[in-house]
Image (cartoon, rainbow, N blue to C red):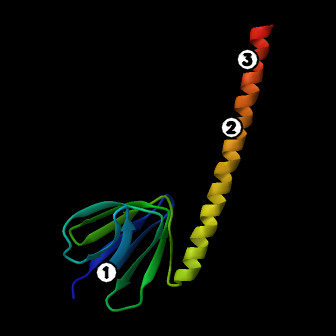
Amino acid sequence: MSDFTLHLQDATQYEQVQGVAQFVGRDASGQFGVQARHERLMTALVFGLGRFRRGDGPWEYLALPGGLLYFVDSALYVCTSHYLRGSDRAQLAEALDAQLRCEEEALRSLKETLHHLEQELMRRILRMTRG
């Protein structure tokens, strides 16, 4: 049975997983799979869970907020802002959901701060033009 090397990279870590037989991911067109000797492939992954396995072993899961996947010459590269890896699908899905909620809260807070700054800037401009 043929296999390939999976290269996982995010902003803070890099892992190399040898002996991968299958990878399943999702892009904008839907779910897809990659096996050894697959033709060259590049796609943008969407938010969700991917999975891979070595030989006939159990599936390992990757929780991703999206990313770029590139397969060439028996090597699969997954580049993302961050990822979580593990064997418990439910636990990873929960962790990814918690991370998403945290990021959404931070974004909401940032938008609120920008809105307040905008309002204050407009008040100062109005005071300057009136007076």
Identify the image quadrant of residue 95. Answer: bottom right
Instruction: Count residues near mark 1 (Cα–Cα under 10 Å), then give few for <14, some for 14-19, many for 20+.
Output: many
Residue at image coords 66%, 60%: 102
Circle 2 SS class: helix
Q: Which amino acid does label 3 sit on?
A: Ile
Q: Which residue is drawn at 28% across and 60% down?
A: 42
Cα–Cα span, label 3 and label 1: 60 Å
Which residue is identified by label 3? 125
Q: Tag 1 or tag 3, which sits nearer the N-term? A: 1
Place of residue 107 in the rendered image (x, y in percent of width and height, measured from the top left) = 64, 50
Please state which of residues 2 and 128 is positioned toward the viewer in this rendering: 128
Amino acid marked by disc 2: Leu
Instruction: Determine whether label 3 and label 1 are within 8 Å by CB.
Output: no
Say above or below: 116 vs 66: above
| Quadrant assignment for the N terminus | bottom left
Question: Hey, what amino acid is under mark 1?
Answer: Gln
* Quadrant in the rendering for residue 33: bottom left
Residue 51 percent across, percent down from the top left: 41, 78
The residue tagged 1 is 22
* Viewer-side label of 2, 1: 2
Q: Distance between the residues labelled 2 and 1?
A: 45 Å
